[in-house]
Amino acid sequence: MSLRSRAAVRVWRTRNARTVGDRGYLAYLVVMVTLVVAAPLARAVWLSAATADGVALLASRDAPAVTGVGVAALWAAALLLGGRRGPVLRAPFLTHALATSDLRRSDAFRGPLLRAGAVATSSTTVIAGVVGSSLLAHDLADPLAVLGFTAAGVMVGVISTVAWLTGQVFPRVATPLALGIMALGAAGVAVPEMRTFTPWGWVALAYPGGHAPTALAALCATVVTLVAAVPMMMDRLSHAQLAAQAARWDSATIHAAGMDFSTAAAVYRPRPHLGRRVRAVRPAGWLPMTFFMRDAIGAARTPGRLIVGILSLVCAAVFLTLAFAPGVPGLVLGATAGVVLFAGLGPVTDGLRHAVYVASDYSLYGISDEHLLLNHLLFPLVMVVVVVTVAAWICATAAAIGLIPPVLGSLALGLLALLARVGNALKGPLPPGLLAPVPTPVGDAGAAIRLIWALDAVLAAAVAGVAAVLVIEAPALLVGVAVTLFGVASHRWRRRA
C-alpha cells in the first residue's frame, strides 16, 4: 500500500483505539477459543482421518476423483460468493473515501484481499496437510508426495481467492462460469482422461500416488498467470460495486451480532426479477392448489436461488444415501445432510415465513391461521417428497446400496427439516431473559446459550440427520427428534404474538 492509503486506514482505525486492557482481553479470548474450541475440533478431525475407516476412505481408488470434483465445486462456489460478498471489502465509509479518491483500487484495497486470501489458502493447505499426513502415518504415501499435495493445497487456496475476486469483479459472468466448471468437473469423473487438461484434474493428479510433478508444474503456471491478472481485475471494480457490497456486509454483521441470523441472511436474498408480470395468485377450484401455484411462481421469480435450493436438496439426499455405504463416517455425513437440507429448504419456504408473519395479525385471506400455514406447507412438502426421495433412489441405485434405508431416511429427514423450518420461522426475536449473564466456573456462558438459541434449528437438523442414518437401527431416536421438533413448533405457535 502507498503512504496515502496507509495514512487513510490509520486515521480510520484510530477512531476506536484499543487500550492495553482491550488488547489483553482480546488475547485472552483468542487463547481460550483456541483451547476450548479449535484444539478439540482439530483433534477430532485428526482422529477421524486417522481411523481405519478414514484411512480406507482417503486411500480408496476414487479419492483423487472426489478431490478433483470437490476442488471444482470450491472454485464454483467462490465465483458465486464473489457476486454477493467479495474479498475486496472495507467498512462503508472507508470504502467511499478510498473509492472516490484518485488511488488505484489495487493499492487502496490490497489489504482486505490479502487477508481473505490468507484465510482461504491456510484452510485448503491444512486440509491437504491432514489428508497427506494421515496417509503418511499409515505408510500409504511417501513424504515427497505428501509435500507435493500440500503444495497443491496452497495453490488451490490462491486460485480460490482469484475466483472469489473474479466473481466480485464480473458478477454477471460468475454464474455461467461456475455452472461450466461444475459440469466439466462432473464430466471428469466419467472421463478420467480429462484430468490432464483441467486445473481441478491437476489437483486430482497431485493426490499422493499420482503424477505429482507434471500436475504441480501446471498448477504453478496457472497460479502465476492468475495472480498477474489480479491488479488489473481490482482496478475494474467500480465505486457502486464496492459501496453496495460494503453496505450489505455491514448490515448483515450488525444483525448477526444481535443473533438475528435469519435477517442477516435475508440481506443477501436476491430480488425477484423473472416473471414479475406473471400473475402469481390464480384462483382455482381447490384452495390448496391456489396457494401451491402462488408459492411455486414466487420461488421461480428468483431462479438462481431456487436452483441452488434444489441442488442443496439433491446434495443432502446424496450425502444421506452415502451414509449407509460401508466404510464411511455415516453419522458425520448424516449431520451434514441435515444441515444442507435445512439450508436448501430456504428458497421454497418463503410462503411459510409469510404465513407465520401474518398469523400474528388480523386475518387477511378469510381463513384461519392454521389453514393458512398448512396451505403454505404444501409446496415445500411436495419439493421434499419428490426431489429428496428421487435423488436418494437414484443415488442408492447407482452406488448399489439397499433402497429402503436411504429412501426412508431421506424422506424422514426432509419432513423433520421442514418441521424445523416451521419452528425457526415461529421463533421470533431474542428473549430478553437470555441477555442476562450466566456465570460458571469457566466464565460467562451467556454468549454460548444465545448462540445455541440462534442456531437451534440448524443443530436440530443435524441431529435429525444423525437420527435418519439410524432409522433402521434405532427408530426411537428418530421418533424422539420428531416429537421434540413438533412440541417446540406447537409451543411457539401457541405463544405467537
Image (cartoon, grey):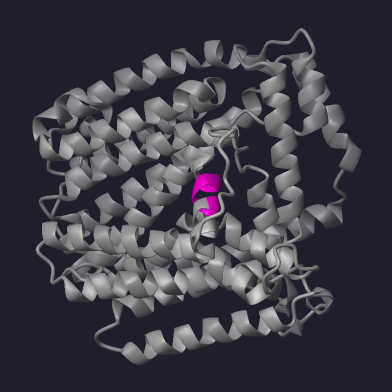
Of 178 and 104, which appears nearest the observer? Answer: 178
Of 92 and 30, which appears nearest the observer? Answer: 92
**Residue 248 visible in the current orientation:** yes
Of 102 and 122, which appears nearest the observer? Answer: 102
Residue 256 occupies which quadrant of the picture?
A: bottom right
**Residue 1 visible in the current orientation:** no
Left or right, 377 with respect to 150, comes to: right
Q: In this view, does 414 lie above or below 158?
A: below
Q: Is residue 297 magenta?
A: yes
> What residue lies at 72% left-to-right and 33% top-to-bottom?
246
Percent x, y of residue 69: 26, 41
Percent x, y of residue 139: 14, 57
Which region is colored magenta?
Answer: 294-299
> What residue lies at 25% left-to-right and 70% top-to-bottom?
407
Kindly report the secondary structure that dominates the magenta region of the rendered protein: helix
Residue 183 occupies which quadrant of the picture?
A: top left
